[in-house]
Each structure stands twice: as structure tokens, then as C-alpha cells.
């Protein structure tokens, strides 16, 4: 398991950056843009880039062959460049420079996001991937807690401090990964020829289509809430900007606590069953949040939401990977992020527009509908998500 924990530093750096981005960028945009819908649209810039770049890079990394491996070259290029633009964001001089730094940061992060995620199944046998995903998401959860908890304190002192911290952490994590993960040594070798041409269309069977549909709808719910929650806390609940972002710490902490148990339960009882529990539970949480009458009640609901989101998020990516071939891991990773990016593109501006018309209570009503649609798609998936012992590859144990 050592390699899995070390690989988690890649997810740690990604999570801390995205958490800070979603928590504080709306506050940077607010002086220039008064429409919540337009702020929501601006928050989807990363997903427009990911929509085109990440599937291509994921597919290309399947066919990359260098002395550093298939995935590592993308990390060595993307992570230091991303760190530069992460650090520059709070030093923008106007809307143009703010958007420029946002675009360049997202462009550089898209270079290494899919390859970083694809490294996990590369070095992990199929039967252990859900547990491994729990470990790396545990590391990602630590990043989110650091962003919301420590980041909110640093933000009160100086708006640049959280982003400078994220930039330093990104570079440090790159060195940890490069030093400890040697792809040619650690990657599992399969008997299937890796040079076969891999086509996106060939991966879209019935199970995968409905599963990706479910991924789309639960990310519509999640991404919209994540992008607009701090504004919800500020304008609907009257919280300060720091307190609104700090409230998300409870969500991230619950996700962190349940990341490993969710992975173990998914391996034992099936990924689909755990995801079903998560979707139904998160629906009830989102439907209840507008009824919360106190900050304590809100934070209790956020804790429950984090638990149910762990059931979904820990098991979803391994589920998508398990329904395909081993030599197409990068391609299916790209498809996973393609669908989640389309959801993230459409959700914040759409939900922001609805908020402009009907008020902030409509945010969680719309998110609940998204989870219901995800449930319908998931019920159409016939695969249970249980590991098939007849198809497990031999290779490295982690």
C-alpha cells in the first residue's frame, strides 16, 4: 500500500488547489461581475479546457512511452507551470488579468490531471482499486480540509496566502511523486498488447453509457453546489466569507473520515450498491439544507453530505474503469473527466441563473433533481461493480 499512499500526494495537491479555487475565486470575481449566473459561468472555465484537453491527454498517455513512463512526463510538465499561475491569481490587476491567470492555471492543470488519476489503476490490481481509490481520496480530502480550514484563516490575513501555499504544495508533491513512483518499476504488466489503437467509440457500451450518464447528473448536483455554496452562505445565511468557506470543512472532514471505509465496503459489497446508498442519501441531505434554521443544523447536514458523497466518489471512478479493458485505462479516465467536465460546465451557470430568478434556496432544490436523474441512470446499469476473479490481472501487489 505504500505506493498508493505516496500517489495520494498527487490528489492532495489537486484537491487543495480546486478547493481554494472554488471557495475564493467567486469573491475575486464579485467586484467585477454582479450576476450570480455570470460568476457561475466564469467558474466553469476549467471545465471547458478539460472538456477538450483531458480526454485527448488521457488517450495519448495510454500510447506514450518514455524513460519516465506513460503518465509521469505530463506531471513533470504540468505541475510546476500550474504552481506559477496558482500563485499569480491573487495578484491580478483587473478582470482581464484575473481571467488570464485562471485560464492558464486551468490549462496547465489539465495537462496532468488525467495522467495523475490514471496512475492509480496502472499500479493497482483490479481487485484492490476501490480500496486504493479510498486511500488517494483520503489524501485528497486532507487537501480539501487544509484548503477550507487553514485556507480560510490565511485568507482573512491576506487573500494571497492560501494560493501561495497551494503553489508550494504542488511543487513539493511533484518531487514526492517523481522520486517515489517509478512507472517502469511499479506499473503492472499485462499480456494484452498496449500498442492496439484505442478508440473512444469502442468504449461506449450500454453499461458505460448509463454509468457515465449517472456520473454526469450527480456532478451536475455536486459541482453547482460546490461552486456557489460560499455565495449561498454569504447572501442566504449572512455568513462572512471566511465562515462560509470554513463551513465546507465539515463536508470535507466527513468525506475524509469515510473515504477508506467506503472503499472497503465497495470492494466487499459492490461499487454500484455503495453508489446507490450515496446518491439516495445525498438527495435527502440536499433537499433538507434549505430547511436548516441554524448554522449548527447546516453543518450537521454537511457532515452527512460528506459521508454520502464518499460513497459515490470513492467508488465511481473504479466502477468506470472496471467496465472496460486494462489497456484503455487512460482513455476511460478521459471519458470520466469529459462527462464530469460537461456537467461542471453546465451546472454552475444554469444553477446561478435559477438563483438569480428564484433566490438561493433554489440551489439545493435543483441539485436534488440532479441526484434523482443520476439514480434513474444508475438503476439502468446492470454491472454490480464486484471484482471478477477470473479476469484479475497478475502483477504488482500494493
Image (cartoon, rainbow, N blue to C red):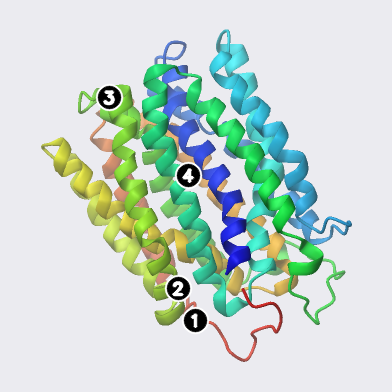
Instruction: Identify the residue position indicated by label 1 in the image.
Output: 386
Q: Earlier in the sequence, mark 2 or mark 3?
A: 3
Circles 2 and 3: CB atoms closer than 8 Å? no
Mark number displayed over residue 248: none
Image quadrant containing the C terminus: bottom right
Q: Secondary structure at mark 2?
A: helix
Q: Position of residue 65 (x, y in %)?
A: 87, 59
Residue 234 is labelled as 3
Looking at the picture, how far across and down is residue 196, in whole percent? 85, 71
Tell me the CA gap for discs 1 and 2. Answer: 7 Å
Q: Report the side of 9 relative to 279 (left or right).
A: right
Mark earlier in primary sequence (4, 1):
4
Q: Residues within 10 Å of mark 4 (few under 14, many from 20)?
A: many
How far, Cα to Cα, is label 2 from label 4? 24 Å
Nearest the eye: 153 or 242: 153
Asked if residue 289 can be seen in this view, the reply is: yes
Residue visible at 32% across and 47% down? 251
Report the Cα–Cα distance between label 2 and label 3.
36 Å
Q: Are marks 1 and 3 in contact (CB under 8 Å)?
A: no
Q: Residue at x 47, y 73 (%)?
A: 381
Q: Quadrant of residue 149?
A: top left
Q: Secondary structure at mark 4?
A: helix
Horizontal relation, residue 339 to residue 324: left or right: left
Q: Which residue is mark 4?
A: 143
Which badge, 1 or 2, comes first in the chain's sequence? Answer: 2
Q: Measure the alpha-carbon separation of dots 4 and 1.
A: 29 Å
Residue at the bottom extreme of this rendering? 390
Residue on which disc 2 sits: 271
Q: Quadrant of residue 148?
A: top left
Image quadrant where residue 232 sits: top left
Q: Give the mark toward the camera: 2 or 4.
A: 4
Q: Residues within 10 Å of mark 1 (few under 14, many from 20)?
A: some
Amino acid at each position: 500500500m505504500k505506493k498508493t499512499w505516496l500517489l495520494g500526494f498527487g490528489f492532495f495537491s489537486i484537491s487543495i488547489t480546486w478547493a481554494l479555487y472554488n471557495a475564493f475565486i467567486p469573491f475575486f470575481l464579485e467586484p467585477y461581475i454582479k450576476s450570480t449566473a455570470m460568476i457561475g459561468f466564469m467558474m466553469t472555465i476549467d471545465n471547458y479546457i478539460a472538456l477538450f484537453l483531458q480526454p485527448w491527454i488521457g488517450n495519448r498517455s495510454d500510447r506514450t512511452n518514455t524513460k519516465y513512463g506513460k503518465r509521469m512526463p505530463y506531471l513533470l510538465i504540468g505541475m510546476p507551470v500550474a504552481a506559477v499561475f496558482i500563485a499569480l491569481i491573487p495578484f491580478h490587476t483587473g478582470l482581464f488579468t484575473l481571467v488570464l491567470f485562471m485560464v492558464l492555471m486551468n490549462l496547465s492543470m489539465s495537462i496532468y490531471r488525467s495522467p495523475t488519476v490514471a496512475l492509480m489503476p496502472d499500479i493497482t490490481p483490479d481487485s484492490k482499486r476501490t480500496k486504493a481509490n479510498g486511500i488517494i481520496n483520503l489524501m485528497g480530502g486532507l487537501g480539501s480540509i487544509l484548503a477550507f480550514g487553514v485556507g480560510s484563516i490565511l485568507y482573512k490575513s491576506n487573500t494571497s496566502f492560501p494560493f501561495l501555499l497551494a503553489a508550494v504544495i504542488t511543487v513539493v508533491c511533484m518531487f514526492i511523486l517523481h522520486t517515489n513512483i517509478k512507472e517502469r518499476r511499479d506499473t503492472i504488466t499485462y499480456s494484452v498488447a498496449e500498442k492496439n489503437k484505442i478508440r473512444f467509440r469502442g468504449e461506449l457500451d450500454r453499461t458505460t453509457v448509463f454509468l457515465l450518464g449517472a456520473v454526469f447528473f450527480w456532478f451536475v448536483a455536486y459541482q453547482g453546489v460546490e461552486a456557489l455554496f460560499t455565495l449561498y452562505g454569504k447572501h442566504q445565511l449572512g455568513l462572512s466569507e471566511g465562515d462560509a468557506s470554513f463551513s465546507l470543512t465539515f463536508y470535507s472532514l466527513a468525506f475524509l473520515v469515510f473515504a477508506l471505509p467506503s472503499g472497503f465496503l465497495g470492494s466487499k459489497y459492490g461499487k454500484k450498491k455503495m453508489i446507490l446508498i450515496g446518491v439516495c442519501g445525498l438527495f435527502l441531505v440536499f433537499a433538507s439544507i434549505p430547511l436548516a434554521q441554524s448554522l449548527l443544523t447546516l453543518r450537521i447536514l454537511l457532515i452527512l453530505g460528506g459521508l454520502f458523497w464518499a460513497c459515490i466518489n470513492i467508488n465511481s471512478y473504479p466502477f468506470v474503469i472496471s467496465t472496460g479493458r486494462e489497456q484503455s485505462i487512460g482513455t476511460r479516465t478521459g471519458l470520466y473527466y469529459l462527462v464530469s467536465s460537461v456537467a461542471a460546465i453546465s451546472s454552475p451557470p444554469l444553477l446561478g441563473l435559477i438563483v438569480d430568478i428564484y433566490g438561493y434556496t433554489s440551489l439545493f432544490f435543483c441539485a436534488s433533481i440532479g441526484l434523482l436523474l443520476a439514480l434513474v441512470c444508475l438503476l439502468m446499469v446492470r454491472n454490480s461493480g464486484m471484482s471478477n476473479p477470473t479476469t484479475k490481472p497478475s502483477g504488482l501487489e500494493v
